[in-house]
Image (cartoon, helix red, strand yellow):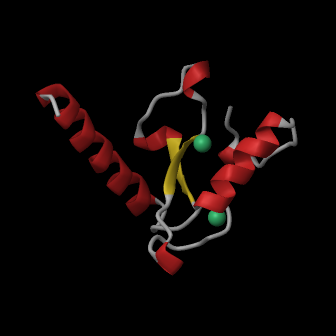
Amino acid sequence: MSHAAHLAHKAAHAIRQTVLEKHNYQCKCCGKKEGEGGERLQLHHVKPVSLGGWSDKDNLIPLCQACHTRVHKEWARNIPLPEDIIHG
Ligand SMILES: [Zn+2]
Ligand SMILES: [Zn+2]
């Protein structure tokens, strides 16, 4: 791993911790806990990167794998989603 890639990896890890902490290590959608049943929560961009969203703690929420997959599918099918989990 190059030095730059290593730093980016460290930064991503730190952001993940910050976001999880901010949301009590729970899926923002169903409330599933980090580590529950081996779950590893994923970070989801509230405002899509393609629309100018940034990968920072204020634009990221934790979602469990099932909810994350669902959010992306529903977005793709134009099903209205709650304000705070809208994504593109
Ligand atoms: Zn969930
Ligand atoms: Zn997402």
- Picture residue at 74% right of the left edge, 52% below the top: 70
Q: Is residue 44 above or below residue 25?
A: above
- Residue reaching furthest front? 1
Total number of numbered discs in the rendering? 0
Q: Is residue 46 above or below residue 13?
A: above
Q: Nearer the viewer, residue 79 or 66?
A: 66
The quadrant of the picture showing ligand 1 is bottom right
Looking at the rendering, which quadrant does residue 57 occupy?
A: top left
- Residue reaching furthest left? 3
Residue 77 x, y percent position in the rendering: 86, 37
Residue 41 x, y percent position in the rendering: 49, 60
Would residue 56 be found to the left or right of residue 42 on screen?
left
Would residue 9 be found to the left or right of residue 22 on screen?
left
Would residue 46 be found to the left or right of residue 41 on screen?
right
Q: Is residue 51 above or below residue 69?
A: above
- Picture residue at 42% right of the left edge, 59% below the top: 20
Could you tell me which quadrant the N terminus lies in?
top left
- Picture residue at 67% right of the left edge, 37% below the top: 87
Would residue 19 be found to the left or right of residue 1 on screen?
right
Q: Nearer the viewer, residue 34 or 59?
A: 34
Could you tell me which quadrant the C terminus lies in?
top right
- Picture residue at 59% right of the left edge, 21% below the top: 50
Residue 74 x, y percent position in the rendering: 81, 44
